[in-house]
Image (spheres, rainbow, N blue to C red):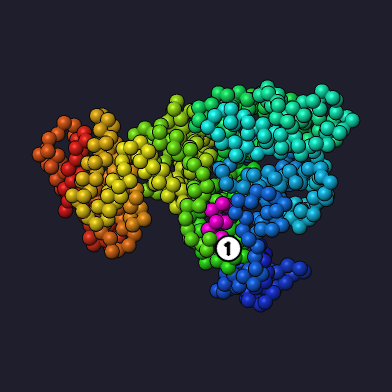
């Protein structure tokens, strides 16, 4: 016999739906033991289980979905809220002094940090009412006794995105002004010295200098401890957003210098600290921002601790879909937005899941449209031929072996392009398939693109890079896709030739591998009509590139690429014909024929410098 929870997990439906169907006699053999149902191990899920759950959810008129809501009080009261309050329990069980949570953007970090603020913060309002119906409240008095017992300093740097250090510092000053303003009671406290109140007034009036602001955490935590006779909780959300902007906008040294002093005062040897939380994408240990901070516990997406609290688990997604009457959309949603692995837990992108359901279950790249993809832009700017080739392999659904260093920093891209995989992983653009810890603390990993949404942003970013650098126009890119689509070989050759004319400097030291990556990047626009593969075994050899049609009305396409330096037109034509003969001789179309693709277009493409020739059969 199994419990309702076990049945729900195996059937992929909410536990409450299993309970409901037991109560209504729809699960054969289910018996009630005490207050719980016991279900036979061989019991089958009723065929209308998902439909039944959908009807029940629709009848309840579910709340609106919280798109862009990071205010915990509002989110849990007015919107559909996925309960993540057991994060508090796990923290209190471990009780690290300072915790850093590194996760990709839009995975619920800010909402979780605001939840911690509301839970721990002393308030004139009885804030326990926001937790009495949450999971944390059922965990016992030892956890409830911490609710509303601490002063809290809360700062989120998610909007510190400016093109100069002066503007960024002004924004930080404004954030500190607001946070100091939340603690105006200190100005009337007889426990606070006059010189401390003078400092408080400078921050409040925005007359504080950069040096003054750098000690703000240290000063405010000391005043709160004096006033409340209890050290505060310090919460810093998206701490590395200003650092990423500093790297992109050329004020990296200034922001690193400021943050080093700012965090040192708040977290290093600060006796006026009960505990602290930080969130971000990177841990940035190499920059010594947390130099000497031996009380810092880092929780990355590689760690099992806290792995269920950022993003949605499969069970949470299934329950959400049932609530909104669209349980049948789970396979499509999984294909588009699943695929992340935090610790050992499969995680869905919460931002995209919420938008998908809210917008009538229309699959789109919701997450990637929430802001600039600076990390991918940096990857493109520093990409070597090998990196571009691997990115192309990832787009084809392949895995790539990469060394992952969790201490990687933004400017390390220029020092070692291989660091791109570490940045792409922590930023949410890659998924770990397998990992093995190395003696130096890095991981040797097999990584892949997690889902269709991220595949779309890779494709668009590669194309955008070509457009930004002026190496290909939008018209040229469209002509390449359209020529392949319509089997227009003259148009295809003209479009590729135009592209190469504009990028001649790249071809002075060409290679077949480089042309391979070039062609893969150019045909990326075709992945809606074709599944693009490269360097796969078929027949008696390995073809260069193949396009498997997603619908039988399109022909299959096989490309064999050849390259030689200093060739004339006649030589190129012979080389292209040689490529076509190789496709035929080694039966590269065998795999397509095995898959029932009768019509196959065979293209031999020969390159020499900026010149090319295409022959077809």
Q: In this orientation, which residue lies closer to the viewer: 38 or 310?
A: 310
Residue found at the far left of this picture? 570
Which quadrant does the N terminus fall into?
bottom right
Vertical arrangement, residue 469 with respect to residue 327, above or below: above
Tell me where residue 463 appears, x and y as whole percent.
36, 43
Can residue 614 be seen by looking at this rendering? yes
Magenta stretch: includes residue 161 = no
Q: Position of residue 294 (x, y in %)?
A: 68, 27
**Classed neighbour count for the residue bearing mark 1: other residues with Cα under 10 Å, few (<14), some (14–19), many (≥20):** many
Viewed as shown, does residue 414 lie left or right of 541? right
Image quarter of residue 188: top right
Can residue 346 be seen here? The reply is: no
Q: List the residue tagged with mark 1.
A: 321
Quadrant in the rendering for residue 36: bottom right
Q: Residue at x 21, y 35 (%)?
A: 610
Q: Where does the image place residue 28, in percent across and percent down from the top left?
A: 62, 76
Magenta segment boundaries in residue numbering: 350-358
Give the residue displayed 83% in from the left and 37% down from the top: 185
Residue at the (52%, 63%) spot, across then down = 360
Question: Farthest bottom residue?
Answer: 25
Count of numbered labels shown in the rendering: 1
Does 438 appear above or below 542? Answer: above
- The image shows residue 514 at horizontal and vertical percentages of 29, 36
Q: Secondary structure at mark 1?
A: helix
* Horizontal side, residue 21 vs residue 371: left or right: right
Return the residue nearer the eye: 4 or 454: 454
Q: Is residue 437 left or right of residue 495?
A: right
Q: Nearer the viewer, residue 536 or 28?
A: 536
Q: Main secondary structure of the magenta part?
A: helix
């Amino acid at each position: 016999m199994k419990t309702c929870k076990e049945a729900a997990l195996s059937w992929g439906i909410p536990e409450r739906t299993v309970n409901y169907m037991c109560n209504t006699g729809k699960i054969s053999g289910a018996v009630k033991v005490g207050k719980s149902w016991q279900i036979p191990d061989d019991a089958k899920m009723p065929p209308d289980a998902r439909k039944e759950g959908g009807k029940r959810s629709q009848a309840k008129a579910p709340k609106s979905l919280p798109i862009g809501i990071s205010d915990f009080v509002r989110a849990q009261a007015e919107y559909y809220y996925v309960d993540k309050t057991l994060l508090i329990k796990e923290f209190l069980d471990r009780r690290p002094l300072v915790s850093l949570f590194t996760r990709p953007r839009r995975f619920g970090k800010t909402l979780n940090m605001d939840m911690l603020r509301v839970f721990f913060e002393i308030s004139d309002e009885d804030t326990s009412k926001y937790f009495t119906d949450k999971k944390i409240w059922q965990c016992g008095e030892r956890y409830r006794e911490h609710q509303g017992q601490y002063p809290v300093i809360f700062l989120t740097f998610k909007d510190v995105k400016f093109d100069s250090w002066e503007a960024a510092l002004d924004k930080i000053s404004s954030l500190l002004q607001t946070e100091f303003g939340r603690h105006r009671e200190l100005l009337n406290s007889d426990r606070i010295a006059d010189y401390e109140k003078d400092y408080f007034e400078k921050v409040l009036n925005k007359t504080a200098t950069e040096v003054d602001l750098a000690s703000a955490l240290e000063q405010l935590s000391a005043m709160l401890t004096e006033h409340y006779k209890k050290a505060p909780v310090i919460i810093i959300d998206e701490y590395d957003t200003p650092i990423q902007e500093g790297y992109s906008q050329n004020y990296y040294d200034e922001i690193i210098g400021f943050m080093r002093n700012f965090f040192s005062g708040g977290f290093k040897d600060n006796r006026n600290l009960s505990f602290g939380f930080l969130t971000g994408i990177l841990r940035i240990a190499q920059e010594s921002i947390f130099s000497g901070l031996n009380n810092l516990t880092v929780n990355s997406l590689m760690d099992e601790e806290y792995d269920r609290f950022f993003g949605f688990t499969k069970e949470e997604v299934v329950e959400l879909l049932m609530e909104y009457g669209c349980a049948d959309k789970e396979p499509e949603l999984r294909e588009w937005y699943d695929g992340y692995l935090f610790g050992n837990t499969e995680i869905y992108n919460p931002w995209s899941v919420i938008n998908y359901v809210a917008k009538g279950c229309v699959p789109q790249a919701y997450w990637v449209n929430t802001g600039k993809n600076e990390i991918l832009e940096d990857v493109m700017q520093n990409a070597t031929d090998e990196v571009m080739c691997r990115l192309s392999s990832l787009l084809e659904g392949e895995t790539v072996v990469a060394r992952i260093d969790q201490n990687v920093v933004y400017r390390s891209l220029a020092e070692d392009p291989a660091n791109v995989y570490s940045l792409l992983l922590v930023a949410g653009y890659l998924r770990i398939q397998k990992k093995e810890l190395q003696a130096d603390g890095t991981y040797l990993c097999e990584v892949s693109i997690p889902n269709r949404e991220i595949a779309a942003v890779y494709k668009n970013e590669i194309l955008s890079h070509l457009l930004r650098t002026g190496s290909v126009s939008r018209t040229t890119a469209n002509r390449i896709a359209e020529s392949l689509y319509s089997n227009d070989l003259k148009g295809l050759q003209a479009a590729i030739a135009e592209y190469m004319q504009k990028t001649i400097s790249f071809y002075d030291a060409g290679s077949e591998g480089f042309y391979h990556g070039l062609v893969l990047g150019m045909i990326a626009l075709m992945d809606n009509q074709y599944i693009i593969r490269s360097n796969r075994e078929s027949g008696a050899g390995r073809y260069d590139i193949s396009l498997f049609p997603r619908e039988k009305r399109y022909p299959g396409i096989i490309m064999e690429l050849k390259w030689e330096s200093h060739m004339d037109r006649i030589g190129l034509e012979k080389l292209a014909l040689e490529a076509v003969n190789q496709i035929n001789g080694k039966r590269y179309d065998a795999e397509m024929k095995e898959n029932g693709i009768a019509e196959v277009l065979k293209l031999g493409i020969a390159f020499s410098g900026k010149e090319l020739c295409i022959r077809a059969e």
